[in-house]
Image (spheres, rainbow, N blue to C red):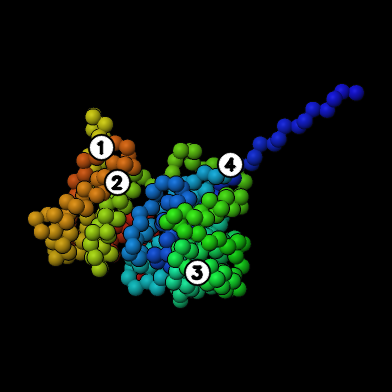
C-alpha cells in the first residue's frame, strides 16, 4: 500500500468588484479612498463638494482587486451642477457590488446622513457602515452612534476608522475584499486609477484652486487640460484652462500681479510631476465663460451626465 501524499492547497480564487464610497459632503470619502489605494487618486480639501465626478481608485488585497468609486457628497441640490453631482453619486451605488456608507463620527448623525441611510434601503446591495474621524470622538459615543445607525439600516458590518491616520483602514479593506464576487481582475495589478492622467492633472489644479481661494469662487470655476505634450527630454508640457463665470472672478484667480495664479500653478506642478514621475511644465490660463455650469460639454469633461430641465 503506497503512502499517501499531502494534497496541494487549492489556489485562492481571484475576486474583483466595485465598492461605492458614499456619504454627505466632507465626511472623508476621498481621504478614505486614497488610504485604501495607498496613493493619491482623489483630490482632498477641507471644503464641501470637492469631488464632482465619480473617481475610481484601484486597490489590491491578496487575490482581490477593489475598484473604489469615490462619489460626490450627497446633499440637497440647488443648481444644475449640484443635481449632476448627486445623480452621479447615486448612480455609483446602483452599479456597485458593495456600498460603504461613510459618516463623520465627530459631528454625529445629521439630516443628510439620515436621508442617505433611508434612501439606501431601496438599493439592493450589501452595505457597510464606516464611522470616520474616530480620533475626535469618545468611545462610548462611537458605540452609541453605531447602534443607532444599525437600528436604522441593515448593515453587513460596521467599522470605526480614521481615514487620515489609516487607523482601522486595513481591517475595512480586508472585509471589503473578502466580500467581492469571484472573478478576474479588470485592471493590471500596477494600475491605481482608471482616470486619464490629463483628467487627474486637471483635478490636481482644481484642488490647489480650492485650497488657495475662499468662499464661493471655487464652486464657480472648473479646470480643463487643453494640451498635453511629451517632450524629447522626458518632461511633459501641459496647458490648462481655468474657466470662471465673470471677469471679476478672473481677476481674483489671477491675483495682484499674477501672484495667486502663480502660487496655484507652482503647487499643482509639484503634485502633477510627482504623479507622473517626470518633470512638468505647467501653463495655466484663466478664461471667462459665462454659464459654463449650463454647458453640456463642460459636464462631459467632468465625466457627469448633463441634467435636463
List x then y, in percent, for residue 246: 17, 65
Does residue 179 lie above or below 190 as drawn?
below
Residue 184: x and y in percent read: 57, 41
Return the residue nearer the eye: 75 or 165: 165
Q: Quadrant of residue 278?
A: top left
> Callout 1: 10 Å neighbours few (<14), some, many (20+)?
some
Find residue 271 and name its label.
2
Residue at horizontal 44%, vertical 66%? Answer: 136
Quarter holding the N terminus? top right
* Residue 282 seen by the camera: yes
CB of mark 2 within 8 Å of CB of mark 3? no
Q: Earlier in the sequence, mark 3 or mark 4?
A: 4
Looking at the image, which residue is at 46% across and 62% down?
135
Which image quadrant for residue 209?
A: bottom left
Mark 4 residue crowding within 10 angstroms, few (<14) / some (14–19) / many (20+): some
Identity of the residue drawn at 60% across and 73% down:
151
Residue positioned 35% across, 70% down in the render: 309
Q: From the viewer's side, name the closer residue of 181 and 26.
A: 26
Report, in whole angstroms, how far the alpha carbon at label 4 lies from the one at label 2.
Answer: 31 Å
Q: Which mark is residue 138?
A: 3
Q: In which image quadrant can residue 3 be found?
A: top right
| Dot 4 or dot 1, earlier in sequence | 4
Which residue is label 1 attached to? 279
Residue 97 percent across, percent down from the top left = 56, 55
Q: Which label is found at residue 63?
A: 4
Q: Give SS at disc 1.
A: loop
Tag 3 secondary structure: loop
132 or 304, nearer to the observer: 132
Q: Secondary structure at mark 4?
A: loop
Labels 4, 2: front one: 2
Amino acid at each position: 500500500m503506497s503512502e499517501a501524499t499531502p494534497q496541494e492547497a487549492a489556489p485562492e480564487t481571484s475576486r474583483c468588484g466595485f465598492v461605492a464610497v458614499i456619504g454627505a459632503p466632507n465626511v472623508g470619502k476621498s481621504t478614505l479612498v486614497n488610504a485604501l489605494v495607498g496613493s493619491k487618486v482623489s483630490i482632498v480639501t477641507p471644503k464641501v463638494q470637492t469631488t464632482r465626478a465619480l473617481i475610481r481608485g484601484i486597490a489590491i488585497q491578496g487575490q482581490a482587486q477593489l475598484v473604489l468609486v469615490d462619489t460626490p457628497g450627497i446633499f440637497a441640490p440647488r443648481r444644475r451642477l449640484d443635481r449632476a453631482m448627486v445623480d452621479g453619486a447615486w448612480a455609483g451605488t446602483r452599479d456597485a457590488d458593495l456600498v460603504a456608507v461613510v459618516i463623520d463620527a465627530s459631528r454625529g448623525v445629521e439630516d443628510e446622513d439620515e436621508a442617505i441611510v433611508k434612501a439606501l434601503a431601496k438599493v439592493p446591495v450589501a452595505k457597510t457602515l464606516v464611522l470616520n474621524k474616530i480620533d475626535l470622538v469618545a468611545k462610548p459615543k462611537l458605540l452609541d452612534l453605531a447602534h443607532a445607525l444599525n437600528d436604522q439600516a441593515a448593515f453587513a458590518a460596521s467599522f470605526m476608522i480614521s481615514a487620515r491616520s489609516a487607523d482601522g483602514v486595513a481591517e475595512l479593506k480586508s472585509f471589503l475584499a473578502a466580500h467581492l464576487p469571484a472573478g478576474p481582475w479588470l485592471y493590471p495589478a500596477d494600475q491605481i486609477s482608471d482616470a486619464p492622467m490629463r483628467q487627474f492633472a486637471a483635478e490636481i489644479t482644481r484642488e490647489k484652486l480650492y485650497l488657495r481661494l475662499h468662499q464661493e469662487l471655487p464652486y464657480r470655476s472648473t479646470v480643463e487640460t487643453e494640451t498635453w505634450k511629451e517632450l524629447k527630454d522626458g518632461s511633459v508640457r501641459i496647458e490648462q484652462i481655468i474657466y470662471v463665470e465673470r471677469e471679476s472672478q478672473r481677476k481674483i484667480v489671477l491675483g495682484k500681479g499674477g501672484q495667486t495664479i502663480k502660487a496655484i500653478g507652482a503647487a499643482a506642478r509639484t503634485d502633477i510631476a510627482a504623479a507622473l514621475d517626470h518633470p512638468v511644465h505647467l501653463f495655466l490660463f484663466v478664461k471667462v465663460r459665462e454659464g459654463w455650469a449650463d454647458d453640456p460639454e463642460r459636464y462631459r469633461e467632468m465625466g457627469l451626465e448633463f441634467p435636463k430641465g
